Image: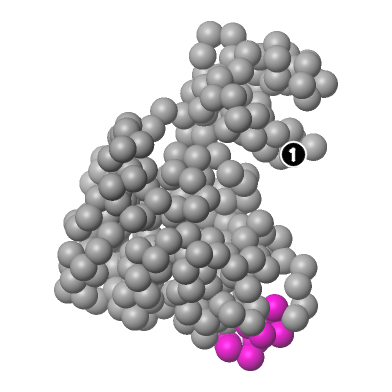
């Protein structure tokens, strides 16, 4: 299947950084023409960059040294933001597209610094919205949209995460009446709830959940049934879960108990 093949291309690029069309063709046992079509499609989605005779993982617009990143206690256990844009990208794209239905003109929304929220930002239509985010990548994606009022949450900047954290970000958040929060997490487990990749992520997400009238979790199927580094809260924090793969009747029962709606992409 095309989706599985393209995910395999992404996984290989995570490991090797750059690969030739010939190598990918042999690795995946398909024609070079098929690989070229896949690379073109993945490039349009911003997941990779085409090079002469092959492809590279998409460049990080804010390159940073590991020394700078290690100075901040906010590096996600799943890797850098750039790395996470390449993981399960097809599922994240589908989830983000499904979440567009929650957008209404005139709203004030928050997009957290997750890669899934970035995929949502990339697909947002022209609409009069106030968009609040701690993510530099999301701000860069949306900065040319004249219909949007963008608000960046400042604070302690993580070059690896390409996002801001800390008390300054939380304090700015409290100044706005937020209609809807769109966020992702490292794991969602039916008994213990939502988990983030770092304590800093969890702390900021807790403030976002408190501030928003409606909360929409954008969680690709790879994260369901998993825990993580830092607990955010229980399922009762959610109004809606958007995912593309859902096969857990016990989780669905628990969500019904907490009055959490489910949207399948």
Using the image as rendered, state which of residue 130 and residue 82 is in the foreground. Answer: 82
Tell me, yes or no, if residue 121 can be seen here.
no
Can you tell which quarter of the image residue 25 is in? top right
The quadrant of the rendering that contains the C terminus is: bottom right
**Crowding at mark 1 (Cα within 10 Å: few <14, some 14-19, many 20+):** few
> Considering depth in this image, is 207 or 146 the residue closer to the camera?
207
User: Is residue 257 shown in magenta?
Assistant: yes
Please report the residue visible at 66 percent of the width from the left and 14 percent of the height from the top. Answer: 21
Q: Which residues are magenta?
A: 251-259
- As drawn, is 48 to the left or to the right of 245? left
Q: Classify residue 215 by image quadrant.
A: bottom left
Work out whether residue 40 or residue 154 is closer to the camera in this orientation and state it: 154
Q: What predominant SS class does the magenta segment belong to?
A: helix
Q: Residue at x 64, y 35 (%)?
A: 11
Q: Tell me, yes or no, if residue 210 can be seen here.
A: yes
* SS category of the residue bearing label 1: helix
Q: Quadrant of residue 137?
A: top left
Q: Name the residue rendered at 66%, 59% in the picture.
A: 221
Above or below residue 241? Residue 161 is above
In the rendered image, the vertical position of residue 229 relative to residue 19, given as above or below: below
Q: Which residue is mark 1?
A: 4
Q: Position of residue 156 (x, y in %)?
A: 22, 55
The residue located at (57%, 51%) in the rendering is 92
**x then y, percent, for residue 225:** 67, 68
Q: Is residue 11 magenta?
A: no
């Amino acid at each position: 299947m095309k989706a599985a093949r393209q995910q395999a291309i992404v996984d290989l690029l995570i490991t090797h950084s750059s690969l030739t069309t010939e190598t990918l063709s042999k690795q995946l046992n398909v024609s070079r023409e098929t690989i070229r079509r896949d690379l073109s499609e993945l490039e349009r989605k911003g997941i990779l960059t085409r090079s002469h005779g092959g492809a590279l993982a998409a460049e990080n617009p804010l390159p940073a040294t590991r020394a700078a990143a290690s100075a901040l206690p906010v590096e996600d256990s799943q890797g850098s933001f750039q790395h996470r844009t390449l993981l399960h990208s097809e599922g994240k794209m589908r989830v983000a597209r499904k979440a567009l239905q929650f957008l209404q003109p005139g709203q004030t929304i928050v997009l957290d610094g997750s890669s899934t929220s970035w995929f949502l930002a990339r697909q947002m239509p022209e609409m009069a919205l106030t968009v609040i985010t701690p993510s530099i990548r999301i701000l860069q994606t949306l900065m040319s949209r004249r219909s949007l009022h963008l608000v960046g949450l400042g604070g302690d900047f993580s070059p690896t995460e390409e996002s801001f954290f800390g008390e300054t970000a939380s304090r700015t958040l409290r100044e706005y009446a937020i209609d809807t929060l769109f966020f992702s997490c490292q794991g969602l487990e039916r008994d213990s709830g939502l988990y983030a990749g770092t304590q800093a992520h969890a702390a900021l997400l807790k403030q976002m959940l408190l501030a928003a009238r409606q909360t929409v979790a954008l969680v690709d199927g790879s994260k369901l049934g998993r825990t993580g580094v830092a607990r955010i809260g229980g399922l009762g924090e959610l109004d809606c879960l958007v995912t593309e793969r859902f096969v857990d009747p016990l989780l669905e029962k628990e969500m019904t108990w907490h009055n959490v709606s489910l949207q399948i992409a």
